[in-house]
Amino acid sequence: MVLDESSIVSKTDAQGHITYVNDAFCKVSGYSRTELIGQNHNIVRHPETPAELFHDLWETIKSGKIWKETFRNLSKSGEEYYVKSVIAPIFDDKGDVVEFIAARVDVTELIKQEKIIQRQLTDSLSGLKNRTALFSDLETGDEDKILLLLNIDRFSNINDYYGYTIGDGLLRAFADFLKETVANYSLYRISGDEFAIIYSGHALDDRLRDHVIDHITRLENNRYEVEGNTLLISLSGGIAYAKYSEVYNLAHMALKEAKERQSKVVFFNDNVELSEKTRNNIWLISKIKSAIEEDRIVPYFQGIVDNETRQIVKYESLIRLIETDGTVLSPFWFLEHAKKAKLYDQLTRIMIAKTFAVFEVLDTYEFSLNLTLQDILSDETRMFLYDTLHSSRATKRLVLEIVESEGIESFDEVTEFIRTVKGYGCKIAIDDFGTGYSNFNYLSKLSVDYIKIDGSLVKNINDDENHLLTVESILFFAQRKGIRTIAEFVENEEIYERLKALGVDYSQGYLFSIPSSKPEC
């Protein structure tokens, strides 16, 4: 009675023919008692359940022992379900097995949830664990971890030359070979061409170092066959031994160092120079945090002149960090570190607030602020900007400079952002145009008011014909589209005269204005 109320129950005779089923068995299987009595359990057997499982079942229960397992069955309607089963023999007075009784629990929902979790932790392309699984596994246990990060060098060239289908095929082939050559370690694909290995149960000794180097060499020497193409690869690796909260960042630093040195692998813990660089990074991040807390992040302003009048008509707001001794640091020294330390968004919001405070009072000039794609995609930064635009009387004089070197890929988000800020009366400029990810095509998709020509082109415009041709192409496009142009890094009269003759609208540089804490008005 207890089993009938709590479980899916059946009984069979010694030959395995069903002699009893309860209501729960009928309900889950979809068969009536009449259809089940006299049959064996093959009637609900799933065709993909291995035969070895049932061979082990019969050997166990015929020997008088209890058998336990979780496996798949198939209902009358063709739906699969999972049961956790316990099957026991029933003996007569002589000790002979005369019947078997089975009690099952339907665990279908649990299995489905487990499969969903596994899919969330599995990279669909390679079949390896993914980035989420890596960080979850690194947090398991208190012991230090050894982590190797592997990157396929110049993988983008494969995609460019062969196409993405072949590129994906190479990633699958590499993952398969990785599985063949790695035993007892956890493997991951954590980004497009980056893989990871956690070495469990090892110390970072000479034996493991030799093993890692030999393994990378073997991976590089393999020929990867993808749709009739034989592909060869080179790899860079970074390995670190540390607590789970640190090991990924340290391994990533080692990987970056390996790429910069063009080394096969860099061991972070063996590299005194890299350890010193890390200490410096930690020191600099602490410096940035202190500057934020002590209100030492400030805007400096550089004037932009109208090339016709040679008068300052607008200003760009530039971030600076003031050290405790009064030294002024440019963003070159701290901005990338702020991004890595997740302090960058906070710096942007400080710049927005302090710049608006200046131009609320100074109401005769346009002024510009730099935004990266990260700023635009940050909900907190974006809403902070919108609130400022809503409440400020300086809003319609603001030019938002989108840093073009970041690459504008999220068109929908960027387009929506531009539409919103233009609704407030702001203008849009594309900064650093002409290098990096420059793409005239996306300019045609974005509502842009200004193009800022990259300073590396401007500085050499009188000495490098290719730079001159690039600037002329930008001007031709901008003039046809009705977009105004601003040249950066204008440092002498010769450059200024050439830009003016070409038809550039505005100039910015040390010839006219040195960045200072107050606009030169």
Image (spheres, grey):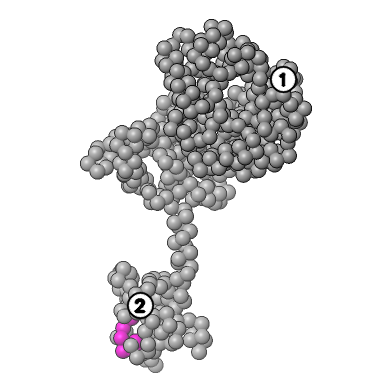
Q: Is residue 218 something one can see in this rendering?
A: no
Q: Residues within 10 Å of mark 1 (few under 14, many from 20)?
A: many
In front: 40, or 441? 441
* Label 1 sits on residue: 519
What percent of the width, then of the height, locates residue 16?
A: 32, 84
Disc 1 marks which amino acid?
A: Pro
Label 2 Cα crowd, 10 Å radius (few <14 / some 14-19 / many 20+): few
Which quadrant of the rendered structure holds the C terminus?
Answer: top right
User: Which residue lies most toward the bottom here?
Assistant: 93
Residue 103, how many percent across, how many down?
Answer: 44, 81
Check contact, mark 2 vs mark 1: CB within 8 A.
no
Residue drawn 56% across the image and 18% down it:
505
Q: Main secondary structure of the magenta part?
A: loop
Instruction: Tell me the residue that label 2 is attached to.
Output: 77
Q: Is residue 77 above or below residue 455?
A: below
Q: Quadrant of residue 292?
A: top right
Residue 40 lies in the magenta-colored region: yes
Residue 393 sits in which quadrant?
top right
Disc assigned to residue 104: none
Magenta residues, as a range?
A: 36-41
Which comes sooner in the sequence, label 2 or label 1? 2
Magenta stretch contains residue 162? no
